[in-house]
């Protein structure tokens, strides 16, 4: 049985919840804080918080 080719570490992560979501409208504004959830540890959500430095544009 053959194995599938390995996935590159730089391959984009698929979005299983909203794969067709369009965020090209003015969704984020400068100085907004965005949190990217990465998982759960000890019953707590964890991830990275980032500050938006430029608004999203159309």
Image: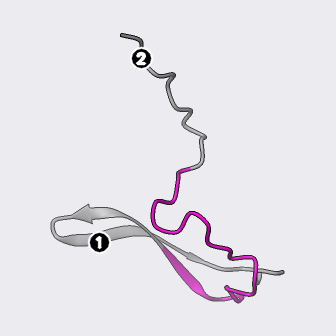
Q: Is residue 41 above or below residue 45?
A: above
- The residue nearer to you, when weighing 35 against 51, is 35
Secondary structure, mark 1, is: strand
The circle drawn on residue 10 is none
Please give the residue where the numbered disc 2 appears in the rendered image: 3
Instruction: Tell how many labels.
Output: 2
Please give the residue where the numbered disc 1 appears in the rendered image: 45
Q: Dividing the picture into quarters, in which one does residue 31 lie?
A: bottom right
The residue range painted magenta reads 13-35
Which part of the image, by quadrant, shows the N terminus?
top left
Q: Residue at position x 61%, y 66% from top?
A: 20
Locate residue 32 relative to residue 57 in the image: left or right.
left
- Give me the C-alpha separation between circle 2 and circle 1: 33 Å
Locate residue 48 relative to residue 11 in the image: left or right.
left
Residue 17 is one of the magenta-drawn residues:
yes
Residue 22: x %, y % from top left: 68, 74
- The residue nearer to you, when weighing 50 against 57, is 57
What colour scheme was applied to this rendering of the protein? one colour
Q: Residues within 10 Å of mark 2 (few under 14, many from 20)?
A: few
Residue 28 is one of the magenta-drawn residues:
yes
Residue 26: x %, y % from top left: 75, 87
Residue 37: x %, y % from top left: 41, 68
């Amino acid at each position: 049985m053959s194995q599938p080719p390995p996935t590159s570490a730089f391959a984009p992560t698929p979005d299983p919840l909203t794969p067709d979501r369009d965020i090209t409208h003015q969704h984020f504004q400068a100085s907004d804080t965005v949190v990217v959830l990465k998982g759960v540890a000890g019953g707590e959500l964890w991830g990275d918080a980032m500050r938006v430095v430029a608004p999203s544009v159309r």
